[in-house]
Amino acid sequence: MVHSFRATVAEARRHGNLYFVALLSQDGILKAFGTARAAWQGWVYSPAITVWVFLAQCLSPDHSCRDAVARLIAWRLTQGLPPCSADTGAYCTARSDLPEEALHALVRETGQQVEDESPETWLWHGRRVRVVDGSTVTMPDTPANQAAYPQQKTQKPGCGFPIARILVIFSLAAGTVLETAIGKYQGKQTGENSLFRQLYDALEEGDVILADRYFSGWSDIALPLARGIDIVVRKHQHRPTDFRTGQRLGKDDHLISWKRPTRPKWMSVEQYATLPAELTLREVRIRVSQKGFRTKSLVVVTTLLDAAQYPAEEIAGLYRRRWQAELHLRSLKMVLQMDHLRCKTPERVRNEFFTHLLGYNLIRGVMASAAFQSGNSPWEISFKGTLQTLDQFLPILLSRVSSDAWCETLLTAVATHIVGNRPDRVEPRLVKRRPKPYKHLREPRRHYKP
C-alpha cells in the first residue's frame, strides 16, 4: 500500500501536473470519462484539470469557486505557465460539463482500490464487512432544485431548503465509500432501504452487511442472503423477542425462524416466488454495562448461524463498530461541509455530492497508507488531522523536496494524529455555546422588504 502511494507521488512529480494528481492520476480520470472526453473542449480546463480544481474546491474550508481558481492560477505560475483568468465563468462552465457517471465511477474505483490494497488483518474473520447508513443533505432554494428534491411538506414555500436522501456503503476495513445513491427525501420508494436495494450489485458473495434496525425487515435480510451475503443488524423494536423459544446456542443466544410475509407492492411476483418460505436466523442479546450509554440492552439479528465460528461476544463487538458509519458521515457532512451543497441545479448538486465523496476516499487512502506504515488501524487516525496535513503538503509537492522525503514526512505526520480512545466517557447531550438570537424565517424573504 505504501509502495503504491509512493509510486503515484513519484509519477505526479515527474509530470509536474496539478498537485492533486498525487492522489488521483490523470489516467484514472480519463479512463472514467471514456468517450465523453472526446467532445471536451477546453484550453485551460481539460477533464483532469477540472476534476482536480473541483476537488480543491470541495476539500477547502472556503468552498468558493474564486478560491479554487486562485489555486489553479498559483500552480500555473509555479510551472512557468501563463496565468488563466481569475474570472470563475470558464471554470463553472467546465464543471457543469462533468458527466455524473464519470465522477460516480471515480468514487467506486478509488474506494475499492484502497480496500483491495488493505492487509488481511484489517478484515473481520477474513471477510469484507460493508457498513450501510443513510443521511440527508440540503441545497440552495432554487426552482430546479425544488422540482428534483422538494423541501419538507411542513415548511412554507420560500422558508425551507430542497432536501435529498443519501445512502452510502462504507468499507469497514478502510472506511472508504464503495457505493452510494441519492434520491428524494419523501415519497414512495425513497427510504434508505429502497435506495439500498438499488445498490445490491455492488455487493459480492461472501460479504457481510452491517446496518442499524432500519434494515432489519424480512425482505432486507432475505434478498442479500439469496446472493450469498450475510447480515448483522439490530432487531426492530416492534418484533417480539423470547429467548425461551427456538434452538438455544448459549445465554441470550438462539436460532429462530421468521416466516415469509405477504408480498410487498414493490416486489415482483417472480422475485417473491424465489424467496424461501421462512428464514432461519440467529438472535443475540447485547447488554451494555458502560455508563453514559442510553441503550442498556439490544438484540442483534444475524445470518451468521455458527456460534463456534462467530461467538456472541464477537457479534456484539462487530455491531458496536457500526458506529463507524456515523463517524464517516460526520466527516463528510461536518469536516468536508457536505451537509449543505452549494450548486443551484440538480445535475451540479449530484456532481458536487460525488466530488465530496471522491475527495473523502482520497483522504482515506492517505490514512490507510499512514496506518499501514505505522502499524495502526485506519479508524485510529484522525480524518480532520489528515485533511489539515494534506492541505499544507500538497502545494509543496513540486518544490525542491524529494518525493521520498515528502511521502515519508507526510505519512509520519498523518500517523501522529491518533484519535483518542475514550470508550467509557460520559457526555451529556447539552451545548454550552448559545445560538444567535435571531427569529426564524416564517415567510419568503422578499415579504420582509419594505
Image (cartoon, rainbow, N blue to C red):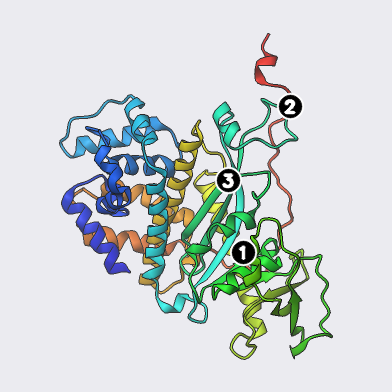
Name which residue type carries label 2: Lys
Mark drawn on residue 183: 3
Which label's residue is closer to the chain start, 1 or 2? 1
Q: Which residue lies furthest to the top in this view?
A: 450
State left or right for residue 10 relative to residue 409. left
Measuring 70% from the left and 56% from the top, which residue is drawn there?
Answer: 265
Q: In this view, does 116 lie above or below 446?
A: below
Height in image: 143 above or below 262? above
Q: Report the label total.
A: 3
The dot on residue 341 is none
Disc 1 crowd, CA 10 A, few/some/many (<14, 14-19, 20+): some
Precedes in sequence: disc 1 or disc 3: 3
**Circle on res. 323:** 1
Looking at the rendered image, the disc whose residue lies closer to the viewer, 1 or 3, is 3
Q: In this view, does 314 lie above or below 27?
A: below
Q: Where is residue 88 in the image (x, y as percent from the top left)?
A: 35, 27
Say the numbered circle drawn on residue 439. 2
Q: Please give left or right for residue 119 compared with residue 190 in the image.
A: left
Q: Distance between the residues labelled 2 and 3?
A: 31 Å
Question: What SS does tag 2 mark?
Answer: loop
Determine the secondary structure under disc 3. Answer: strand
Quadrant occupied by the C terminus: top right
Observer-nearest of 78 and 104: 104
Residue 18 vertical position relative to residue 158 in the rendered view, above or below: below
Q: Which comes sooner in the sequence, label 2 or label 3?
A: 3
Q: Can residue 74 be seen in this view?
A: yes
Residue occupying image coordinates x 79% and y 65%: 237
* Amino acid type, label 1: Trp
